[in-house]
Amino acid sequence: MTPFGGSKNGFINSVALRMVTIAAVFVIFVFACWFGWTSGTASAQAEATLENATQVQQALAYFGSDQGSYPSTYQFTDQNILNLLYMNSMPLPVDATGVCSSYKTFQYAQVGQQDYSLTFCLNAAAQHLAAGVHVFSSQGIDVQPSK
């Protein structure tokens, strides 16, 4: 008998049960913290990628307004043209891993003289956009450019 009226085996079992419970709570806490951190990081990276794509879209709009047409693919990739007049530097997608691994840069194509497509990928939802591939054009986002 123990001083508290229980048997010694019962006391040991209750201590073991408490230890297992504390360990389980600790593991759940660590998992919840890790999940919150990784999902928060993915969301922040997706937000940054969307902001960068919006910056490029704005530069394209200024270029189109000034020049009367959107840049050719060559003009877009020649960083001296867009960067000197319309942007400080060409931004890149922030996190191009996982499903977005083939989108390490923004993919641009001129569609006729009056439209373009700027393709990018988000690893997580950002603002009103779901995770996945999206396209900016002169008509907006995820609207097919006119030919």
Image (cartoon, rainbow, N blue to C red):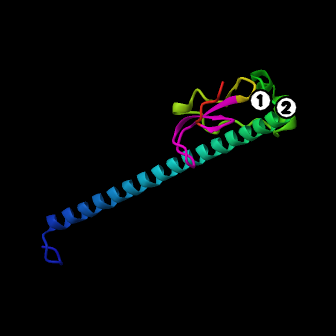
User: Residue at the spot x=67%, y=45% of the render?
Assistant: 51
Residue 130's x, y, as percent? 51, 42
Most foreground residue, 99 or 86: 86
Q: Residues within 10 Å of mark 1 (few under 14, many from 20)?
A: many
Residue 144's x, y, as percent? 60, 31
Label at residue 70: 1
What amino acid does circle 2 point to?
Answer: Gln
In the drawing, does residue 26 fall left or right of residue 37? left
User: Residue at the spot x=69%, y=35% of the render?
Assistant: 138
Bounds of the magenta segment? 116-141
Label at residue 8: none
In the drawing, does residue 58 fall left or right of residue 67? left
* Mark 2: secondary structure: helix
Quadrant of the rendered structure where residue 9 is?
bottom left
Q: Residues within 10 Å of mark 2 (few under 14, many from 20)?
A: few
Name the residue beneath numbered marker 2: 67
**Is residue 119 on the magenta stretch?**
yes
Question: Do tag 2 and tag 1 residues touch (Cβ < 8 Å)?
Answer: yes
